[in-house]
Amino acid sequence: MKKFSLVIILMVSISFLIISFIGGKIGTYRENDLNSIKRENSMNSKLDYVELNVYMIGDRPPHTDHIYEEINQMLRQKINTTIVPKYLSWSEHVKKYPVILAGGDDVDLITAAVWTKYFEYARKGGFLEITDEMLDKYMPLTMQRMPKNKINGGVIPETGKRYMIPANYTSYYSHCYVVRQDFMEKYNIRSIHNMDDLGLYLEAVKQNEPDIIPFSGSGKWNQIMSYGYRAEVEVKANLTGAAPSTAAFVSMKRGPYELLTHEEIKALRIPYYQKMREWYKKGYWNANAPFVTLDTNQEFMNGNSALTITSEANINMIISYVNQNHPTWKVGVYPVYPDGSAVISKPDYQNGMAVPVRSENPERALMVLDLLKNDRKINMTSMYGIEGEYFEITESNAIKLIGSKKRLEGFSLNQTGASGWRDSEFDLPAYGRNKALLQFFQKNAIDCTIKNFIFDPTNVQDIHEELTEVTEEKLNMLSWGLVPMGEIERTFDEVYQERVKAGIEAYKSEINRQLNEYLEFTE
């Protein structure tokens, strides 16, 4: 494949702005003499051999090479293609993602999602447009199995053009408290239904387990505050496309879907900031938590922390790791949502895959994606490893890891970075998983009316840029309890005044206008 000179790569890495020039390099879709992939995915002898680079987000798993050797055997047999899995780690993907798109490496498929700024890069011309004709010709299995509304999750609203194919998977804002159930039993704590129950657990750990910190959290936001607060008051902060922390909207089972005023948000948040201050003073986490970077899941699995807060998608990984490495432990998983509250479905564009406009083999990239998404054996191998070697499927239709501890060292379920082609039909729970948890999410899940709403800041671009630059530092300190009790309310008001100066009220009016138009259109 074409290689770019060191000079070009260096120039690309100097400035993020080079991505803006991609728009002028969009080539028209190239027709060639490849025959359409047969619907039964049998080998097409007229296809020349091609090797593709596939970029995923996440730290490269230790067993990647071996697992993708198996996947490549199947891809080679079916469409005479192999793929090279490449990874942008969690710590570097924000900086390196635009460099890759701008020419930092050859790339044919890449993870594209709302959290990778998909809409921003699509509007700048970083991805190839994927037309219905291309889907019919190169992704027939996707067209057969995937609902059209999900396929269109990657459509840019103002142009109607599609640049990404979402995963055929419905996920929810399903964050859970993951705790040491053996500690729960030891200190007679029956369950965790809310943040008050969580506080009892953290207090028991603090008083009785001197070698472990109750919560080894880190980073800008205190996850206890962020997820617990939103769940208990049924508020979801921010809208896709809007500047960070500029608004919040009520997201209840029966609406209304409208932005809250500053006073309404203040009345909800202040009690939680005060609770976080109390918990910080009790020593439930370290004072340097906002300034360090730790993997809170790994801290829990290593025994350094008695709590992690993570999405439902990571729980299989945690349970399988603990079962292998800490057989005397018990893991307890409790949803942050009180029973009966709304568990909101995530947007269809939450995770997916795109073909960068620079790909030299876009047709084959789509053919590969069709198989990654829809071929059961290929898909499950990418998620769970090689069947019979890494896992077996139990009579209860669950994934059970097999093999020695040495053989499975470093291996975790669903941690391959393949979320862009995850599929609900092929997704199975880990063996030993609490069925009550799955039933809870199924019982409380709702398909939020505005989940696919995307705010377009064009009409308020200057305000949008100013609000984006407004510091989050004060709110970060509030969420970690580092602001003295008597200064909490004043500090929160100061942040709002900074946003007033930036034009937040006009900004929110534009959001409300677009939101009302969207609701009228979808009704």
Image: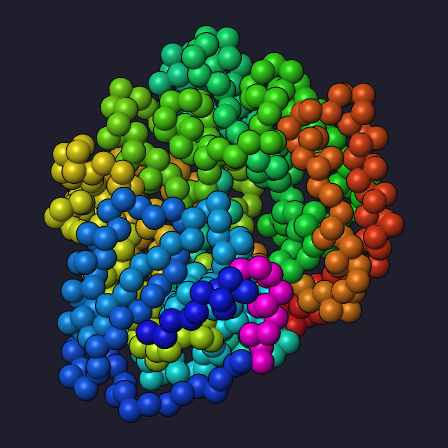
Q: Nearer the viewer, residue 343 or 303?
A: 303
Residue 165 visible (yes or no): no
Q: Residue at x 60, y 61 (%)?
A: 15
Colour scheme of this structure image?
Answer: rainbow
Q: Residue at x 17, y 33 (%)?
A: 406
Q: Which residues are magenta?
A: 13-24
Q: Quadrant of the N terminus?
A: bottom left
Residue 103 visible (yes or no): yes
Q: Is residue 224 above or below residue 62?
A: above
Q: Nearer the viewer, residue 318 or 230?
A: 318
Location of residue 342 by image quarter: top right
* 23 falls in the magenta region: yes
Q: Residue at x 36, y 75 (%)?
A: 2
The number of numbered discs placed on residues in the rendered structure image is 0
Q: Quadrant of the C terminus?
A: bottom right
Q: Main secondary structure of the magenta part?
A: helix
- Taking 212 as reference, is 16 left or right? right
Q: Nearer the viewer, residue 167 or 64?
A: 64
Q: Residue at x 35, y 78 (%)?
A: 361
* 240 falls in the magenta region: no
* Position of residue 290 measured from the top left corner of the image (x, y, whole percent): 61, 31
Q: Is residue 408 above or below residue 156?
A: above
Location of residue 277 by image quarter: top right
- Taking 23 as reference, is 69 left or right? left
* Position of residue 48 measured from the top left corner of the image (x, y, whole percent): 21, 81
* Position of residue 285 measured from the top left corner of the image (x, y, whole percent): 56, 21
Q: Nearer the viewer, residue 151 or 30?
A: 30
Q: Is residue 339 above or below residue 519?
A: above
**Residue projecting furthest to the front:** 7
